[in-house]
Amino acid sequence: MNDMAATVRDQRDGAPVSVFLITKNCAQWLDDVLSAVSGFAEIVIVDSGSTDETLAIAKRHGAHVVHQEFLGYGQQKQVALDLCTQPWVLNLDGDEVIDAELRDAIIELVQRDDPNVMGGQVRFRDWFIGVPASKHTRAISRVRLWRRGRGRFLSEQIVHESVQLDTSGQIEHLPGWVEHYGVESVALRVQKINHYSTMRAELDASRGKKPSALKLFTIFPLRFLKNYLLRRAFLDGRRGLIQAMASAYYSFLIEAKKFEAAERARLGLSSQHKDKS
């Protein structure tokens, strides 16, 4: 039994995967994030100015750490991706922990090295007030594992970035979960909603997307119903209700901020509120 465990550890030590992250003040979760990928060949971290223990934790796990002023999420992740050296790359955020089942599935995929397989799609599960979302809700899944050199992030993706794969190939749906802790409390959820909605509104405006009165009126109830009923957030009880409301509020804020920016431009007002006291 011990010999078998040692063999598995040896195989994991040789897993040809570069794990890459962009960070800023992620110390709260980073030790767990990096411990879960300790069997992979390389960890690359691009940090944009952490003032907590993020850098110390990263170095303790043997990560290759580089400082880069924040360029927007897409461009920042591309900087990290360009530093990777292994045949396969796995992208995680500083609040995302892969479980053992997913880790083993990644190792199996990359060691199998099927030339027809381009990458792997993984499922995400939010933790909220100390409890993970029900496994029976409709999980969000994304491609986070792929062959290095076959995908990249676009510089215009300042928020909600995703890898753009440049050649065809099979994407495997991997078992297990990415446990997401970054919205674990109401305060964290609200903080991220405000931050990301501002960035998304600015991105939409740069793409010529104008505010819509109809969307401003309908986006909240429609997004709430989508998350609460279609994605089955109701299975999480009051936690699911709060999460569905928060998601709807995020979508509403994007439209509200687009409207605000357009009105300020029309009236010749400053884009930022100034305290006149």
Image: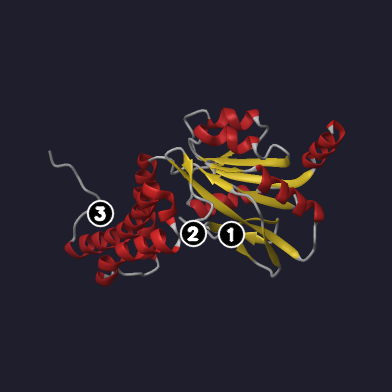
Q: Quadrant of residue 220?
A: bottom left
Res 157 label: 2
Please rate how many residues cluster around mark 1, counting C-alpha atoms within 10 Å: few if below 14, some from 14 to 19, many from 20: many
Q: SS class of the residue under badge 2?
A: loop
Please rate how many residues cluster around mark 2, counting C-alpha atoms within 10 Å: few if below 14, some from 14 to 19, many from 20: some
Q: Position of residue 254 (x, y in %)?
A: 33, 59
Q: Earlier in the sequence, mark 3 or mark 2?
A: 2
Q: Is residue 109 visible?
A: yes
Cα–Cα gap, marks 1 and 2: 10 Å
Q: Residue at x 71, y 62 (%)?
A: 118
Q: SS class of the residue under badge 3?
A: loop
Q: Name the amino acid type tagged 1.
A: Val
Residue labelled with disc 1: 163
Cα–Cα gap, marks 3 and 2: 22 Å
Q: Name the amino acid type tagged 3.
A: Ser
Q: Earlier in the sequence, mark 1 or mark 3?
A: 1
Q: Residue at x 27, y 60 (%)?
A: 256
Left or right: residue 166 versus residue 247 is: right
Q: Is residue 65 visible?
A: no
Q: Residue at x 27, y 66 (%)?
A: 216
Between circles 1 and 3, the one closer to the viewer is: 1
Residue labelled with disc 3: 271
Please rate how many residues cluster around mark 3, counting C-alpha atoms within 10 Å: few if below 14, some from 14 to 19, many from 20: few
Q: Earlier in the sequence, mark 1 or mark 2?
A: 2
Q: Position of residue 87 (x, y in %)?
A: 75, 52
